[in-house]
Image (cartoon, rainbow, N blue to C red):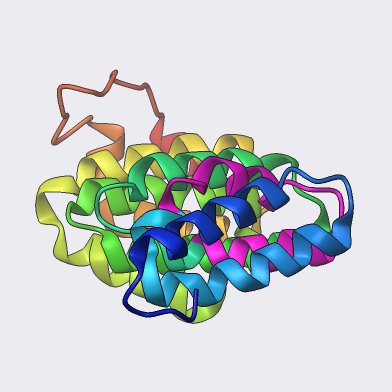
Amino acid sequence: MSIEDDGGLRVLAINILGKFLSNRDNNIRYVALNMLMRATTLDAQAVQRHRATILDCVKDSDASIRKRALELLYLLVNENNVKPLIKELIEYLEVSDQEFKGDLTAKICSLVEKFSSEKIWYIDQMLKVLSEAGNFVKDEVWHALIVVISNASDLHGYTVRALYRAFLTSTEQETLVRVAVWCIGEYGDMLVNNVGMLDIEDPITVSVSLF
């Protein structure tokens, strides 16, 4: 990979490292992940071809492998692959162990914020994270979410209903509760009266007496 004017050899080396990721020896996989991190600065496209295997390593039982694979995957996310990768990571967030949830949550939130081209996608992903790991979401992250919600006037009704539904099933997630209580306080009339319904929504029945 140090031979700068021979891209063919570099791709060959990256492909060999990609095969190392399927090795049963954790030391070999860890070395391969480290080398692939260096290789992303030389030929990110060649490393992208091994994205599925790297994602599998994020779900590995070994903590060191998981952490390094997550750092590598973070470098590979771009506007073309962010949505399927975020979907996979959020699904894994639900079953990941407590030690890894903090790192995983931080990386997901950072990527969602960085690549959010649509406010509704940003809000949807952040509500999923809050529902699964709200207790690991940092203050500045949910503060930023509230700012986005405030500025998305066309999504106030949709967001308050989505938060209400999430609140009913995830009351143990303190940060989710904070955002939901704020949103219901601001837009409770839209929740009760199903104001601002989008085509993708089903109406819900909420009694004022609940509050």
Relative depth, front residue between 187 and 25: 25
Q: Main secondary structure of the magenta part?
A: helix
- Residue found 35% across the figure and 69% down from its top: 6
The percent coordinates of residue 90 (x first, y second) are 55, 45
The magenta stretch is: 48-73
Q: Nearer the viewer, residue 1 or 162?
A: 1
- Residue 29 position, x and y percent, is 77, 58
Q: Is residue 144 magenta?
A: no
Work out whether residue 91 or residue 150 is closer to the camera in this orientation and state it. Answer: 91
Q: Quadrant of residue 11?
A: bottom left
Give the residue displayed 63% in from the left and 57% down from the top.
17
Whole-percent x, y for residue 174 in the image: 64, 61
**Residue occupying the point 58% across, 38% down:** 91
Residue at the extreme left: 154
Q: Is residue 11 visible?
A: yes
How many labels sit on residues?
Answer: 0
What percent of the width, then of the height, locates residue 205? 37, 22
